[in-house]
């Protein structure tokens, strides 16, 4: 019941994800990983069946990277998706801009490809492969009679990028492409595939749902490295992981060379102009196959709803602005609001986990010395799925297991507190300061009760 209540409380508070740590969950009482997995799976399944909300809810299982056995045991749980991918149609498909998102590691040639597709140097490019796009950038232009919006992104799939660095850019990408992109362009390079390239492909397959891959096209750069008369399909077939990725994307792949293929000869395979036309035909086919739809999910729909509400607010308060200006201002406002809220939740979760551990550690020590606290320990042990303790020695064990639970409970409740504290904040720093103060006060009150 404890885990379910935590999940339900988080959903009520507007959370879209929760992290449940299982580090050391079965050590104190020698529970096998399979038993911990069974309890957690049952609780999550019941929560999924009973929940009334429709917003996607992600449950992350936190496991130490060295704990190979637990990783294997919880693999099936971690693959459980509490989200639903859906497709939607533009209300006026004939006048709608085609939204394309460029994805790939830093140095893959995303920005150069964007310039090649739009036929103009709009995206900044870098000579060094170690530098590259750090911020999302959006450009719109008419290409072959069709309005195209390209969203260039940082290296979302770089193996060395931290989640904190990427979080603002992921949020920016979502607001820019809302209510959803018509296609994802996964950019890779022609050439020898090192372990790093293989890791990028693994990440792409890991993070993309099967539904999202239905809207993906694999686009290669550095096409001049292809052997004479070789086509990109031949190159793909030489690497199993690469072949599997393209297969998951419906066999859709194209190749460019942003430096050497600018001869613009019609019907010439090694011509960027020819490849742009072929790429747009492929994307048009994807749109037609999806009945004029684009990729979306509940989160993107939520972002779009927030943008539309802000559009109405700006339209009434600033009637002189053009529709484009209103939309851009609304996207900026929603991005800033969401980012501040995310800062409060993340900071609160971190601080809450800390206070949870400290408070329960003190409690476990006092409980051994004070049998009157036995009932409280029983409640904690129930939360952690531990049998009731009847001896001081067993009480220490229950406290140890409860300590693990407290990390999760403290982190979750800290996130709840952070969510509330950040609501009225006007900046990221203010959100963090408000959250720290709120969680600190909660931690003091918890310790005082003991």
Image (tube, rainbow, N blue to C red):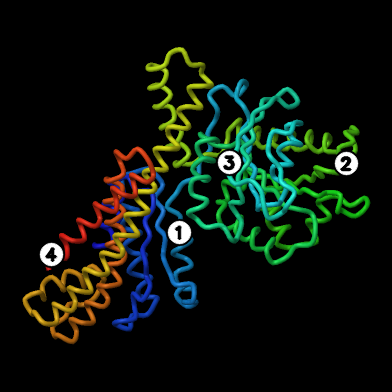
**Mark earlier in primary sequence (4, 2):** 2
Distance, label 1 to label 3, CA atoms, is: 30 Å
**Mark earlier in primary sequence (3, 2):** 3
Q: Nearer the viewer, mark 4 or mark 1?
A: 4
Q: Secondary structure at mark 4?
A: helix
**Mark earlier in primary sequence (4, 3):** 3
Provide residue 275's location: percent of width, then percent of height: 81, 38
**206 relative to 402, above or below:** above
Q: Nearer the viewer, mark 3 or mark 2?
A: 3
Query: Which residue bears the numbered disc 1?
Result: 80
Query: Which residue bears the numbered disc 2?
Result: 269
Query: Which residue bears the numbered disc 4?
Result: 448
Crowding at dot 4, Cα within 10 Å, few <14 / some 14-19 / many 20+, comes out as: few
Q: Nearer the viewer, mark 4 or mark 2?
A: 4
**Mark earlier in primary sequence (1, 3):** 1
**Mark earlier in primary sequence (4, 1):** 1
* Mark drawn on residue 136: 3
Picture quadrant where residue 380 is located:
bottom left
* Mark drawn on residue 145: none
Crowding at dot 3, Cα within 10 Å, few <14 / some 14-19 / many 20+, comes out as: some
Q: Nearer the viewer, mark 2 or mark 1?
A: 2
Crowding at dot 1, Cα within 10 Å, few <14 / some 14-19 / many 20+, comes out as: some
Distance, label 3 to label 2, CA atoms, is: 31 Å
Residue located at (47% from left, 27% from top): 329
Provide residue 52's location: percent of width, then percent of height: 31, 45
Distance, label 4 to label 3, CA atoms, is: 47 Å
Determine contact: label 4, label 3, CB under 8 Å.
no
């Amino acid at each position: 019941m404890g885990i379910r209540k935590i999940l339900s409380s988080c959903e009520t508070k507007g959370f879209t994800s929760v992290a449940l740590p299982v580090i050391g969950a079965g050590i104190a009482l020698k529970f096998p990983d399979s038993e911990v997995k069974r309890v957690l799976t049952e609780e999550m399944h019941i929560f999924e069946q009973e929940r009334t909300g429709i917003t996607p809810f992600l449950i992350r299982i936190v496991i130490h990277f060295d704990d190979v056995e637990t990783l294997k045991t919880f693999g099936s749980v971690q693959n459980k998706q509490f989200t639903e991918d859906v497709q939607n149609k533009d209300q006026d498909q004939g006048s709608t801009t085609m939204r394309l998102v460029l994805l790939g590691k830093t140095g893959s040639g995303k920005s150069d490809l964007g310039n090649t597709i739009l036929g103009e140097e709009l995206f900044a490019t870098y000579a060094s492969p170690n530098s590259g796009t750090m911020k999302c950038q959006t450009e719109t232009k008419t290409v072959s009679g069709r309005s195209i919006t390209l969203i260039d992104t940082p290296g979302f799939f770089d193996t060395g990028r931290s989640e904190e660095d990427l979080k603002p850019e992921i949020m920016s990408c979502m607001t820019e492409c809302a209510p959803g992109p018509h296609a994802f362009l996964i950019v890779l390079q022609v050439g020898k595939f090192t372990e790093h390239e293989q890791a990028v492909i693994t990440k792409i397959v890991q993070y993309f749902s099967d539904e999202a891959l239905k809207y993906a096209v694999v686009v290669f750069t550095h096409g001049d490295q292809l052997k004479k008369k070789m086509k990109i399909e031949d190159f793909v077939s030489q690497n199993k992981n690469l072949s599997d990725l393209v297969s998951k994307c419906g066999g859709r792949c194209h190749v460019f060379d942003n430096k050497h293929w600018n001869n613009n000869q019609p019907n010439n395979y090694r011509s960027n102009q020819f490849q742009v036309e072929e790429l747009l035909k492929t994307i048009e086919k994807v749109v037609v196959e999806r009945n004029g739809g684009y990729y979306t999910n509940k989160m993107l729909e939520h972002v779009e709803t927030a943008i539309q509400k802000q559009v109405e607010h700006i339209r009434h308060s600033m009637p002189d602005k053009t529709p484009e200006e209103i939309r851009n201002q609304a996207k900026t406002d929603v991005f800033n609001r969401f980012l501040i809220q995310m800062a409060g939740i993340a900071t609160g979760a971190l601080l809450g986990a800390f206070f949870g551990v400290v408070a329960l550690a003190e409690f476990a020590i006092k409980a051994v010395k004070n049998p009157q606290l036995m009932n409280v320990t029983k409640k904690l042990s129930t939360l952690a799925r531990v049998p009731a303790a009847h001896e001081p020695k067993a009480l220490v064990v229950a406290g140890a297991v409860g300590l693990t639970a407290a990390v999760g409970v403290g982190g979750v409740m800290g996130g709840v507190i952070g969510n509330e504290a950040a609501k009225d904040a006007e900046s990221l720093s203010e959100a963090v300061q408000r959250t720290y103060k709120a969680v600190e006060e909660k931690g003091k009150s918890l310790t005082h009760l003991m």
